[in-house]
Amino acid sequence: MSLRWSGPRRLRVRLTLWYVGLLTLVLTVFVVGTSSVMFSQLRGQLSRYIVQDLETIEGLVTFGADGAPRVRDDYHNHPESRFVLERYFEIIAPDGRLLFRNERLGSGTLGGAPFEGEGVGGYSERTGQLDDGTRILLVSRRHLFGDRATVLRLAYSLEPVWQRVTDWVVDTLLSFVVMLLLAAVAAYALVGRALVPIDQLATRVAGITPARLDERLDASHLDTELAHLAAVFNGLLDRVEQSFERLRRFTADASHELRTPLASMRSVGEVGLQEARTPDDAREVIASMLEEVARLTRLVDGLLELARTDGDAPLTRMRVAMLALAREAGAMLEVLAEEKEQRLVIEGDDGAVVSGDPVFLRQAIVNIIHNAVKYTPQGGAIRVTVRRAPEGRVVVEVADTGEGIPLEHRSRLFDRFYRVDASRSSEQGGLGLGLAIAHRAVVAHGGTIDIDSSPAGSIFRISLPAAA
């Protein structure tokens, strides 16, 4: 058996991609977070510089005889005074008239007329954009020069800040690309090593054929998770082996049961062809063959019924009163009991109700009562009792006054084609399927069957879950 399983390879790629994707997400969050923190810190630092410069400018502004403001660059020989002209600076009147702008600002403006409360009682800070698209950080303040009220506006370009953050992001991303490539290679190798035991398990399972169902996976060298997986596979193999064994035994038993009536029909037919001379002789031969055909029909019907109750058979569940069902089953067998002068009594609790398929349950009770009728001697008694038991169970007991069942046969009594006395069962038309069918029907409903037997008789006890 050759089977190539590429699952681990695909899983290896998927796990590697998941790892790389998760790492990419983490690194992206890191880059976004650190970039935001860096921009916030640089902007805060720039804001503090603007405020300091604005305080310096307040001492550099003077008004000439014409009333126009000027900015001196020799105020107390301030060492930073010359840098003031490198910023964007303007002075406006409270009514919005432009009083002064520095050369760097040119013909542009830092915001037009002042908004309500701008620069009053402190510094007003906001971001904006010049006409040429330059992003700026602007700080305003109201200031009195004698009796002259003005609004001083000073701005720094934010482009160096953005450029610094952008450069850091680009450099970081380039290094992250290299890190991700290395991480992908390492993850692919590590995942490959981790998946080797799974690949070995798959190869081992692929080598188990129907002829080698007794083999099991060795989990002694595996980690806990893989050992659990191997244990699950071994449990599956146990169930498959049991199913194959049951199928093998069933096929052998069915072949044996079919061989006997077929051989009998063949021998009767051959003898009839050689010896039959009169119509009565021919009728006798045909009658013998019809008896075997009837036996074959019962065998096939039993096998079909067993197939219906075997495995996960579909059940039509409804509330079933077990005493009424037992009476129906008993009515079907009253004629047989009367022929043997047997007394059939059915009694119990009308409130004993289960949830189940009435057809399957009736067949189970019919088969058990029929078994009791067959093996109870002439003039005996059969009593069927239905009662409610503790722990939410319903019990159906079929007691007979037969010879009992030897202890060594009880464990196999519900096996297919098994008969305690094969010769006696054949004489009575038994196939060894009735109790097997009853057992499967009860088990399909979550119930059990057990037996108490003695030389004075036997009791078959069915226990089923009671309906809610």
Image (cartoon, grey):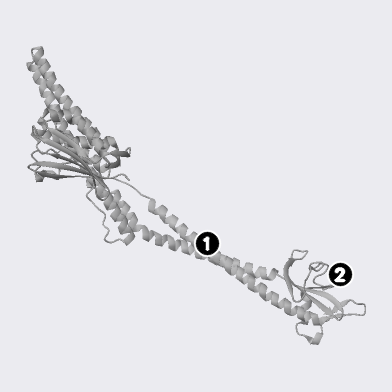
Q: Residue at x 75, y 82 (%)?
A: 80
Residue 225 can be seen in this image: yes
Q: Quadrant of residue 388?
A: top left
Which image quadrant: the N terminus? top left
**SS for tag 2?**
loop
In the current view of this chain or complex, which residue is farthest to the bottom?
76
Q: In this view, does 218 lie to the left or right of 173?
A: left
The x, y position of residue 36, in whole percent, is 61, 68
Q: Which label is found at residue 466?
A: none
Label 1, on which residue? 25
Taking depth in this image into account, of 307 and 69 the one nearest to the observer is 307
Q: Is residue 84 left or right of residue 260?
A: right
Question: Which is closer to the viewer, label 1 or label 2?
Answer: 2
Say if 252 sits above or below 67 in the image.
above
Q: Which amino acid does label 1 sit on?
A: Leu
Say if 284 sits above or below 48 in the image.
above
The x, y position of residue 298, in whole percent, is 19, 29
Label 2, on which residue? 97
Category of crowding for the residue at label 1, using alpha-carbon neighbours closer than 10 angstroms: few (below 14), some (14–19), many (at least 20): few
**SS for tag 1?**
helix
Taking depth in this image into account, of 186 and 266 the one nearest to the observer is 266
Cα gap from disc 1 to disc 2, whole angstroms? 52 Å
Say if 82 sits above or below 253 in the image.
below
